[in-house]
Amino acid sequence: MRTYPPAAVVVNLLLGLPAVVPVWLLWYFAVNWPLAGLGWTQGEPTENDGMLPWFIFAVPVLSVFSGLWWLANHLLRRRRHAGPRAAGAYWTTSALLTLVPTGALIAVL
């Protein structure tokens, strides 16, 4: 059984540091979803600009981050030459490792 490569652990933990911003943007959008009853919590009452400014800001941020994350993990995965069964475990582990800094920040605050 092969183990998860140490380089991928380091890369995903380092990518998790700037990932705090895209995760926060996704959380903010989910909380302030404009359709009644679909938000997870009560929306901010002063948030009356609509969601278009958030789409204009969030879509490029999320696109750039997800593109860099995919490229880094694709290159690391390709160098490893693991079979197709290991692909799902690799990508799942990579995503969870990227969320570790956000989880640590939530736990501390």
Image (spheres, grey):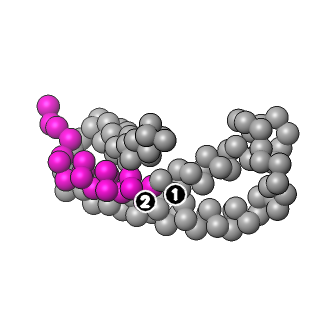
In-image side of 22 versus 47 (left or right)? left
Q: Quadrant of the N terminus?
A: top left
In-image side of 109 versus 12 (left or right)? right
In the rendered image, residue 72, in percent from the top left (x then y), is placed at: 32, 60
Tell me the quarter of the picture where residue 79 sits: bottom left
Q: Residues within 10 Å of mark 2 (few under 14, many from 20)?
A: some
Q: Nearer the viewer, residue 99 or 88?
A: 99
In the rendered image, residue 102, in percent from the top left (x then y), is placed at: 44, 46
Q: Residue flagged by tag 2: what amino acid is it?
A: Pro
Q: Is residue 19 above or below residue 61?
A: above
The secondary element bearing badge 1 is classed as: helix
In the rendered image, residue 11, in percent from the top left (x then y), is placed at: 27, 56
Residue 26 seen anywhere in this rendered image of the structure: yes
Q: Is residue 9 magenta?
A: yes
Q: Residue flagged by tag 1: what amino acid is it?
A: Val
The residue at which mark 2 appears reads as 18
| Mark linked to residue 21 | 1
Identify the residue at horizontal 43%, vertical 40% (top origin): 108
Q: Is residue 32 above or below residue 51?
A: above
Point out the stretch of residues depicted in magenta. 1-19
Tell me the quarter of the picture where residue 73 sits: bottom left
